[in-house]
Image (cartoon, rainbow, N blue to C red):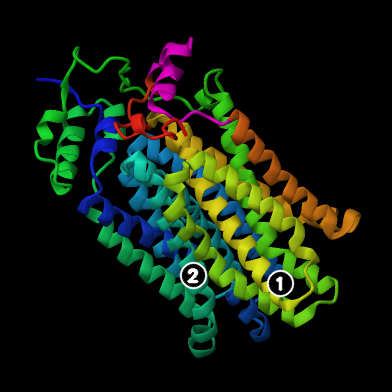
Amino acid sequence: MNTHISAGQRLDNIPIGKFHRRLMLLVGLGMFFDSFDNTLSASVLASMLPTGFSTLELNSLFLSVTFAGLAIGAAFAGWLSDRFGRGFAFQFSLALFGILALCAAMAPSMPVLIALRGLMSIGLGAEYVICYGMITEFIPRYRRGRYLGMLGICGGLGVSLSSLLGWVVIPAVSWRGMFVIGGVGALIAWWMRRGMPESPRWLESRGRHEDAEAIIQKIERESGVANPEAGSTPVGHQAGGAVDEKAEWVPITVLFSRPVIRRTFMALILTVTCLFGSYVVTGWIPTFFVKQGMTVSTSLGFNAAIMSGYVAGPLLCVFIADRLGRRRSIVTFGTLSAIFAGIYPFMTEPVLIIAIGFILVATVAAFLTLGLGTTPEFFPTAFRFRGGGVSQTVGRIGLIFSPFIVLWLFNSYGVIGVIGAVSGMYVLVTLLNAFAGVDTSREALAQIAADDPQPESDSVSDLSSSGSTHAARRPDSRD
C-alpha cells in the first residue's frame, strides 16, 4: 500500500541515538578538513615567499581565486543537492577538494597551484553548505542547536590545527605537506561516509516514498524506536493540516517569488553579516592595532584569543542554543558581537586585549555557527540547499570585495569607521531577527505552498522542515 510517511515529522520525533552520533562524526570530519584546507593559506603562502616559489602578487591572486571558488562552490552545492540528492553532493564535494588537494601538493609552479586551488575551493565552498544542511535534514529540531554547535567546534578545531601544524610541518617537509595532510584526511572522511543514507526528506520530496520509508525505519531501529512501521500514515489519512510535497523540480526563481522572498532576504542579510563580521574581526583588527603602534603584544594576544575563541563560541552553543532557541541565540550573540567589536579596538592593556578579544572571537564564532546553520531552516526541502547555497554565494562574493570596503572605511573614517560598520551590521541583523524573524515551523513552511499562486510552487510545501511533538511543549517551537 502506498504511504505518505511525513519524513520530517518522524525524523523530528526520533530520539537521539547511534545514527545521529555517527552522522555527527562523519559530517564533523568533513567540516574539520574543509576548515583545515580553507585556512592553510596563511602559513603556506608565507613560506613560499623566501623560496621564490611565489610573489606577493601571486599570493594575492591565490587568495582571490580561493574566495571566488568558495562562492561558486556554494551555488553549485545548492543546485547539486536539490537536483541529485544530499548524499551524492555530500560525497562529490569532499572527493573534489580531497583529490585536488593532493594534486596541489605536486604543483610544479605557482600558476598551476592557483588553478588547482580555484577548483579545489569549489569543493570547499560546497562542503560548507552541505554540512550545515545535513544537520537540518537529519537532526531532530529539539537538538539541532546543540549539533550545530558541535559542527562549529569541528570547524574551529580545523582552523586551530591548521595553524599549529603549519609551524611544524612546513619547516620539516615544506608547504606541500599541508596539502597532503588535508587531502588524505578528506579522502579518509570520504571513504568513511560512503555508506551514509540519502535524506528521507529529499526522497519524499522527489516522490520516492518507499526508499524514504526504508531509511527512516532503519534510523528508528538504530535509535531504539519500538515499532517503526507504525509511523507511516496511508495517503488520504494524513494528520490534519499536512500538505503533500509534490515530486517536482522547483526552479531557483522560487527563491524570489512572493511567498519566499522575505525568507531569502533574511537569509542573505544573516549570511553576509556572519561572514563579513568574522572576516573583519579575525583578519583586520590586528592590522589596525599594528597601524596604531601596538606591535607584538597585541598580535600575540589576539592570536591566543582566536585559538580558543573559535572553539569556545560553538561550545557555548552546544549548551545554550536549544535552551534559548536558535533565533534568540542569534539575537544574543549578535548583540554581544556588536558590543565587544565596538570596544575591542580601544583596549590598550595586554590583559584586556586577550580577555576582550577572547570574548569577541567566541561570540562572533557562535554567531557564525548559528547563522550559517539556521539559514537552511528558512526554506522547504524542495529548495532548501539552493536557498542556503545562494545565501552563502552572495556572502562569499561579498568577501571578494570586502578588503576594498574595509580599506576605504579605514582611510576615510579610521578604525571607528570600520568598527562602526561591523557593529552596525550586527545590530541590524539582530533587530531584524528579534522583531521580523522568519518563522521556521513546519506549519509556516507548508503555508508557503498555500499562498503561492504558481502551480509549480506546490512542491515547496514541507511537512518536514521543522516541527515535532517536542515543539508543542517548547516555548521556542516556532523559533
Q: Amino acid at mark 1?
A: Ile
Is 322 colored magenta in this rendering? no
The answer to which image quadrant residue 460 occupies is: top left
Q: Which is nearer the N-term, disc 1 or disc 2?
A: 2
Q: Amino acid at mark 2?
A: Ala
Q: Nearer the viewer, residue 139 or 125?
A: 139
Q: Residue at (74%, 63%) from the top-left corner?
A: 344
- Number of the front mark, 1 or 2: 1
Q: Which residue is mark 2?
A: 104
Q: Residues within 10 Å of mark 1 (few under 14, many from 20)?
A: many
State the SS at label 2: helix
Give the farthest residue toward the bottom: 172
**Left or right: residue 336 compared with residue 152:** right
Q: Residue at (46%, 25%) from the top-left corner?
A: 251
Q: Which residue is mark 1?
A: 353
Task: State yes or no: discs 1 and 2 in contact (Cβ < 8 Å).
Answer: no
Q: Residue at (61%, 75%) from the top-left corner?
A: 304
**Left or right: residue 191 compared with residue 256:** left
- Quadrant including the N terminus: top left
State the SS at label 1: helix
Q: Is residue 107 among the parts visible in the rendering?
A: no
Give the farthest residue toward the right: 412
Residue 214: image x %, image y %?
A: 15, 37
Residue 424: image x %, image y %?
A: 74, 45
Residue 468: image x %, image y %?
A: 31, 32
Span of residues in magenta: 437-458
Is 457 colored magenta in this rendering? yes
